[in-house]
Amino acid sequence: MLGLPPRWALALAARSLLLWAGARGLLLMAGVAFGIPQGIAVAAVVAVLAAHDTRILREGIFLANLGFSSLAPAAAAGAAALLVEMIAAFTL
Amino acid sequence: MSTVLAAESVIKRFRRRTVLNSAGLWAREGSVTVIFGRNGAGKTTLLRVAVGLAGADAGVVIYRGERYRRPRLATLAVGGLFFIPERGLLAAWFTLREHFRLLARTTRDARIDDAITTFGLETLLDRRPNSFSTGERRRAEVGLAMARGPRCLVADEPLQSLAPLDADLVIAGLRQLASGGAAIIVSGHEVHPLMDVADDVLWLHDGRTRALGRPSRASEDDEFRRAYLGPAA
């Protein structure tokens, strides 16, 4: 993933995956329980992920200091989010 | 001494507030430049612009003779720059040993054993950074920087919240890197230790940078004393 060592890419992606899945799950439950419109739920997930991306990018400073593209952590996060979205689309 | 890193005429606005108004900085080969400024003066922003982690509304960054409108840290790092941010450099999921291992893979002539010994990192190697104290974290960060052997080190508040012994270790590391020819620029408020290590002092005030020269000259500057050091200086 953009030259990022696999273990580092996997760790970043796994973390994103957990957070994305967690946020998605909570919002689904909230949506069912309180009837929150889908648009608000999606916006909230995006906000959570954006905040998380900032944190990932901050941690990516170490990788950038070694010459790895600072896009690598973001790419890892994006790939993880996409995977969860695909799973959600097929299972929900 | 040639200038390795410079940021010139940097303007940065946050909504309607202009934080940097034609500010600049520079780091020279084999010397330590210290940048002072009150809280909120824009030191962190200026450093982040200089290393490519923040965009500016105007200004230019010059690294080893190359001019960049908007540099990227990864690009500058390939040319030997290393940045230690104020809020931590280390990745939470990996032990310090794993950080060093990755550094060894990507750095020719990495001086890892030296760095581990110099900064007393032996007992931290198999721990994750989120279990480090502030002093341990800073020692680890400067140790990684030293192992990388940078041509230019930019460190944002490296002495913040450090015990004197840890601060001494960090200062000694900065001095050692400079004596090996690296250009160092650090920010902070710890006037005495930073003045001791500085070759050159910059003061960020009202969005602009003032070059105060050597520490002995800086501490005699009336405006700097009045507006930054305070009456006790």
Image (spheres, helix red, strand yellow):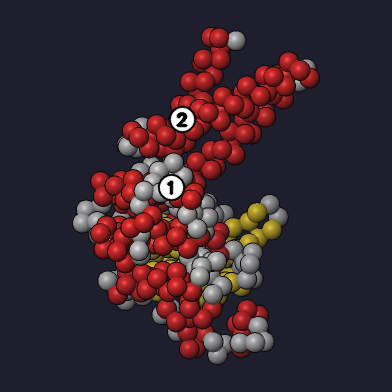
Q: Give the residue displayed 39% in from the left and 34% down from the top.
A: A9
Q: Nearer the viewer, residue B37 or B102?
A: B102
Q: Quadrant of the C terminus of chain A?
A: top right
Image quadrant of residue B1? bottom left
* Amino acid, disc 2: Ala
Compared across the picture, whether B175 is left or right of B113 comes to right
Chain of the residue on which disc 1 is drawn: B
Q: Is residue A51 above or below residue B119?
A: above
* Amino acid, disc 1: Arg
Q: Is residue B110 above or below residue A26?
A: below
Q: Give the residue displayed 62% in from the left and 23% down from the top.
A: A24
Check disc 2: other Cα within 10 Å, few if <14, some if 14-19, many if 20+.
some
Q: Is residue B117 above or below residue B75?
A: below
Query: Element at badge 1?
Result: loop
Of the two numbered discs 2 and 1 in the rendering, the one whose residue sits closer to the viewer? 1
How many marks do you count on the picture? 2
Residue for badge 2: A14
Q: Give the residue displayed 51% in from the left and 81% down from the top.
A: B192
Image quadrant of residue B183? bottom left
**Is residue B58 at least partly visible in the picture?**
no
Q: Nearer the viewer, residue B108 or B214?
A: B108
Q: Give the residue displayed 49% in from the left and 43% down from the top.
A: A57
Q: State the mark number for residue B128.
A: 1
Q: Nearer the viewer, residue B107 or B15?
A: B107
Image quadrant of residue B227? bottom right
Compared across the picture, whether B128 is left or right of B41 comes to left
Residue A29 image position (x, y, % from top left): 69, 19
Q: Quadrant of the N terminus of chain A?
A: top left
**Is residue B169 at least partly visible in the picture?**
yes
Residue B22 image position (x, y, % from top left): 56, 66
Q: Residue furthest left?
A: B109
Query: Element at badge 2?
Result: helix
